[in-house]
Every structure is written in C-alpha cells, then in structure tokens.
Amino acid sequence: MSRVVLVSTGGTIASRLDREHGHVTPRAGGDDLLDAVRSQLPDVAVEVDEFCKVPSFNLDLEDAFRLALRIDQHLARPDVLGVAVTHGTDTMEESVFLADLVITFDKPVVFTGAQRHADEYDGDGPRNLIGAIRLAASGLRGLGAVIAFDQEFHAARDVTKTHAYRVGTFTSMEHGKLGEIDGERIILHRRPLLRLTIATAQIEPAVDLIKLTMGADARLLRGAIASGARGMVIEAFGRGNAPLAVLAGVREAIAAGLPVVITSRCPQGRVQPIYGHGGGHDLAAAGAIFAGDLTGVKARILLSVLLGANFAPPAIEARFAALAG
C-alpha cells in the first residue's frame, strides 16, 4: 500500500504546557500528532518515524543534515508517496532548504509545524499537519522541499519566518507562495525555477553568519578566522556594502582560504557589486561571492553544503550564481 511517512522532530506543534515549571516543551510524539488528525485523513495511509523530540532552536546543521538523509531514505522506498516533517518554526527555513539541496528523489517533501502549542485552545498545529500530509500524498513533483503553513505552501529557497508568533508567519517575500491548500484541494500557482541538487556525504558546520551594523569593523571576521571558521557569510548593507574596516577583514579571510559570501541585511532585493570605497565593488574585487537575493541564513546553508562536498572556490561561486536570482 502506498503511504506518506510522517517524520517528527518536536517543535511547538509537539509542545505541551508544563504547569509545574511554567514553560512549554516538546512532549508529544509523532503518533500523538497523527492520532489527533487521523479521522480527517481516512484516505491516506501514514507511517510515523520519530526522528527526535526537541525545540528547533536546539538543532544544529549536522542534525538537519541527518534529517535530510533520513527523509531521502524514506523517499527511496517504492511504497512512499512523499514525506511530511513536523519541525519547530524557529529554524524550519534552514532545515527545509538544506533538505532541498541534498535530497535526491523528486517526491513531495513537506515541512510544517505550529506557532501555538498543543494545549492552546486555538492551536494551529492540526490544520497545518493535515495540509502537509495531503500535500505529501498529492503526487506533485518538481517542487523540491516546501513549507506548508496556514493553508499555503512555499519553496525552500524563498521562504522565511516573518513574525515571532502569528500563525501566518511564513512568506516568500517578493517571490510569492507556490500554492494553497484549501481543504482537500491542492492548488498550484507556480513552480520554483531556482533549484540545485548537491551530492554530498557530509556538511561543513563551521560557517559563520555576520550581520553588519553602523560602525562595524573587522573584529568579528578576525574572530571567526581565529576560531576555525571554514567560511563566512556577511549580511552587508543595502546592495552589499561594508565599511572600509570590514573590507580589510574580508581580504584577510580570503587570504586565509575562507570563502566569503555577501548578502543583504535588507529583507528584500539582491546584492550587486556597484559601490566603491568599501562597497560591493571593492568586496567583489577582493574575491567575495555575491549571493543575489538569498538571505543570510540560506546562503550559510548553501555554503555549508558546498564546503562539505569539497567544492573548489570557482565551483562554489558558480553554484551561488545558479541560485542567486
């Protein structure tokens, strides 16, 4: 019998209120989550794989890579239509993008979760889970890994968390959602064009993300170099600009053999090497890689995967250009 595999990892969707200590923690397993919605999915066979039970802010890149490999193993089975993943929202956009980069099978992979824990009277978890399982069972191919949330689904490359607690937190900014989940209907509006699949047996977690602020200097860059970073991503100003002191640090990092990737701290728009006097033109001349409109967290994931796959600097730059938009 064909089925969907539900891989559970914890997160708010699995969290319950601990009245003794006054906090919420992931306590529900995948079977518990499925039991709460099974009656709404009479036509879908679902198998549960409990990967872990933690808040997503405690996951690291190696955890997310192991999760992606586990998903790929399930997709390799002929009886599996697709995989739904329950995950905390704090780092979901990172895990889904990593999965999109390394998964080798073109079956639906759908991440979902909740903004309200399971003991809240108006929890959003059950509706999101039903939608994710229906999308995973739909047979839609060519979308890569997606996030399904609040009756919409979004491409891994584009999606980001935009609100700390509202249920409609995930958006794709100027790119727009892929489609909608309206009850039992899956409505596809567009397909993602910018996607890569990268074969790798490991990931490089020692990639730092540095956000520039007014008056920033090279201290954080030098600290990353000294502490063993293998690469760094800089969220620069506007179109990809930095103070002269940061430019000096970028030159030092590149001289030390670290790839340096430039993104924008702006939530929309793409970087371009235009300005001098420490701006993007000078950063590019120093050898920095410009990441188009990829966000800083997505650029870090991509660089971590490419370094784990032992790509040389020209190949790293080429792969960033392919996803830059």
Image: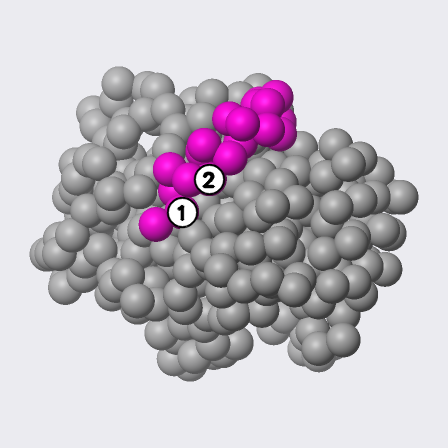
Residue 32 visible in the picture: no
Nearer to me, 178 or 131? 178
Which three-letter amino acid code belongs to the residue tagged 2? Phe
Counting from the top left corner in percent of width and height, residue 92 is at: 49, 54
Counting from the top left corner in percent of width and height, residue 165 is at: 49, 78
Per the image, the residue denoted by label 2 is 320
| Among the 4 quarters of the image, the one containing residue 147 | bottom left
Secondary structure state at the residue bearing disc 1: loop
Chain part drawn in magenta: 307-325
Magenta region, mostly helix, strand or loop? helix
Secondary structure state at the residue bearing disc 2: helix
Picture disc at residue 44: none
Q: Is residue 260 left or right of residue 2?
A: right
Q: Residues within 10 Å of mark 1 (few under 14, many from 20)?
A: some
Give the colour scheme shown: one colour
Q: Residues within 10 Å of mark 2 (few under 14, many from 20)?
A: many
Counting from the top left corner in percent of width and height, residue 66 is at: 57, 32
Residue 315 to residue 265: above or below: above
Counting from the top left corner in percent of width and height, residue 94 is at: 52, 50
Real-space Cα separation, disc 1 to disc 2, in angstroms: 6 Å
Per the image, the residue denoted by label 1 is 324
Which three-letter amino acid code belongs to the residue tagged 1? Ala
